[in-house]
Image (spheres, rainbow, N blue to C red):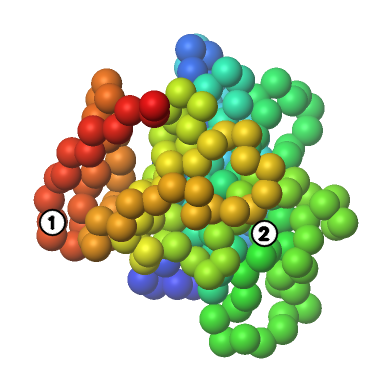
């Protein structure tokens, strides 16, 4: 059930390959729904482009903002609560199993009111409780907003931090300040066009063009 009339945590994103469309659905503030397989909230849905059949592909998501597919992997970025923004990598070849990313049982963020909730304990591990660990997490929150892939890099945008992060995909530790650009504006979306990165700046509003080459 939706009880948040302002529709917070409602973020959705689309990604596709030649077989399927992937659609994310936020948990709409109804965090208990993210683990309920009878609800589409807090899930990524897989929609077969031929049959139009829809199935739950992954669960335990809070508020996905951007997704992209490359080489049978789905990359998704999502808002955590107070901290704990995540980059998750989802294997598209796994069948007969709904991959579980832990929300609201595990998160590297905290509830905004600082209170403990038995039904949403926000454990500071995913793996120990049988969930998929995020590839990267950002604490404090950066207000993560979109992701694109450029060569061997993650290109991740943020709203709260006003930054564009360009990170090596082989990064093994959760060190996210490898390279970032402070635009001084909230970045809502990004688009790659050749060597240029188009930034959709929410707070102007406006569009900026960044030319970036990995030397």
Q: Horizontally, is 204 left or right of 4 in the view? A: left
Do the residues under discs 2 and 1 have CB atoms within 8 angstroms? no
Q: Is residue 69 above or below residue 145?
A: above
Q: Nearer the viewer, residue 153 or 133?
A: 153
The quadrant the C terminus occupies is top left
Q: Secondary structure at mark 1?
A: loop
Q: Which residue is mark 1?
A: 205
Residue visible at 72% across and 80% down in the picture:
117
Q: Which residue is mark 2?
A: 103
Q: Secondary structure at mark 2?
A: loop
Mark nearer the N terminus (2 vs 1): 2
Which quadrant of the figure has residue 199?
A: top left
Q: Is residue 151 above or below residue 212?
A: above
Q: CA distance from mark 2 to mark 1?
A: 32 Å
Q: Is residue 190 above or below residue 30?
A: above
Crowding at dot 2, Cα within 10 Å, few <14 / some 14-19 / many 20+, comes out as many
Could you tell me residue 136's position as x and y percent? 61, 49
Could you tell me residue 12's position as x and y percent? 43, 47
Res 182 label: none
Residue visible at 23% across and 33% down in the picture:
211
Q: Horizontally, is 30 left or right of 133 in the view? A: left
Can residue 55 be seen by looking at this rendering? yes
Q: Is residue 70 above or below residue 59?
A: above
Could you tell me residue 208's position as x and y percent? 16, 44
């Amino acid at each position: 059930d939706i009880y948040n009339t302002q529709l917070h945590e409602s973020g959705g994103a689309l990604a596709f390959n030649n077989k399927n469309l992937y659609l994310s659905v936020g948990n709409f503030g109804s965090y208990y729904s993210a683990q309920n397989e009878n609800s589409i909230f807090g899930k990524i849905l897989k929609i077969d482009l031929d049959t139009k059949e829809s199935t739950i592909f992954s669960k335990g998501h809070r508020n996905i903002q951007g997704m992209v597919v490359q080489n049978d992997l789905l990359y998704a970025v999502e808002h955590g609560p107070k901290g704990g923004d995540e980059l998750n990598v989802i294997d598209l070849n796994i069948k007969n199993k709904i991959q579980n990313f832990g929300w609201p049982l595990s998160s590297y963020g905290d509830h905004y009111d600082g209170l403990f909730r038995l039904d949403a304990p926000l454990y500071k591990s995913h793996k120990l409780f049988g969930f998929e660990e995020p590839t990267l997490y950002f604490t404090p929150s950066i207000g993560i907003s979109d992701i694109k892939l450029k060569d061997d890099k993650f290109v991740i945008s943020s709203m709260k931090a006003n930054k564009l992060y360009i990170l090596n995909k082989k990064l093994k530790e959760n060190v996210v300040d490898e390279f970032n650009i402070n635009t001084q504006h909230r970045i809502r979306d990004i688009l790659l066009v050749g060597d240029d990165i188009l930034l959709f700046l929410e707070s102007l509003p406006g569009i900026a063009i960044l030319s970036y080459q990995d030397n």
